[in-house]
Amino acid sequence: MTTMGAPFSGQIGFVATEMRWPTTHMVAPKEKAVGCVECHSTNGRLQKVSGLYLPGRDSNKVLNVLGWTAALLTLIGVLIHGHCASALPAKGAKTMAERIYIFKRFERFWHWSQAALIITLMLTGFEVHGSYKLFGFETAVNVHTIAAWSLVTLWVFAVFWHFTTGEWKQYIPTLDKVDAMIKYYLTGIFTTPSIRSARPRCPSTTRCSGSPTCSSGRWSRR
């Protein structure tokens, strides 16, 4: 009352009122529903509302630079790693050996599906954050949500697969031949036969240390 400049006696009471509500409970029809971009955009209805972070409207330049730098460096590293591992011949070999698969079909499906979903989450997540406009905010949110639940579902199936096949045993911490494994992933992957060489599938694990022999459930050097 003070703000309105009206007199106030200091007493508070109740006043009987009547209100008529339509059967739609004040909910507008879908044709008049407000879309996401009406608010989640730089020129939306909430563009002048300060003091809060609004996805699609607000972004942080420092976080954008750090995020894109990490994403690009990761992509460059993966491309270099994949190219060198597939293009360079084995040490001492004149020709490329026959290519075979040492990973099971579900392992390859799980690996590449997870990579695709994470890339999708990254692209849509940056747009939700307001870094750029590519798909549109509403589409980016929907795709981001679908990709997130798909990734969770994939993890559930992966956990189930690991426990039912016994592959979970490869994640038991061990220091057995850890020096050979480190050496292989640092340099040996570019100079030794690696996955592309013809060799038998190790029956109990997919962990590899750069040699076509299998010992104690792990590929090891002899």
Image: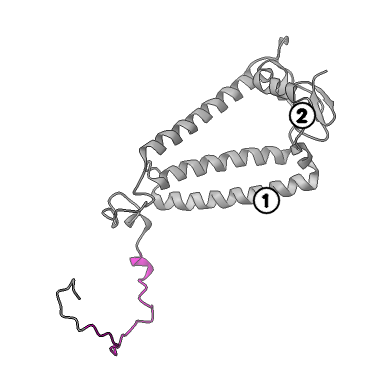
Mark 2: which secondary structure? Answer: loop
Tag 2: residue type? Answer: Leu
At 72% from the left and 39% from the top, the residue drawn is 105
In the rendered view of the protein, which quadrant contains the N terminus?
bottom left
Name the secondary structure under disc 1. Answer: helix
Residue 29 placement (x, y as % from top left): 36, 71
User: Which residue is label 1 attached to?
Assistant: 156
Q: Residue at x 56, y 43 (%)?
A: 117
Whichever of labels 1 and 2 marks the residue nearer the N terminus, that label is: 1
187 displayed left or right of 161: left
For residue 170, what is the image quadrant?
top right
Query: Where is residue 186 shown, x and y percent of the image?
Result: 65, 20
Q: Please identify the residue farthest to the right as the structure is shown.
A: 216
Magenta segment, which residues?
Answer: 10-33
**Residue, x 41% and y 44% (percent of image)?**
127
Question: Which quarter of the rendered picture does the C terminus lie within?
Answer: top right
Q: CA distance from mark 1 to mark 2?
A: 28 Å
Q: Amino acid at mark 1?
A: Val
Q: Nearer the viewer, mark 1 or mark 2?
A: 2
- Residue 175: give its label: 2
Check disc 2: other Cα within 10 Å, few if <14, some if 14-19, many if 20+: few
Q: Position of residue 37 (x, y in %)?
A: 35, 54
- Which of the 4 quarters of the picture holds residue 211? top right
Left or right: 11 as drawn, with respect to 109? left
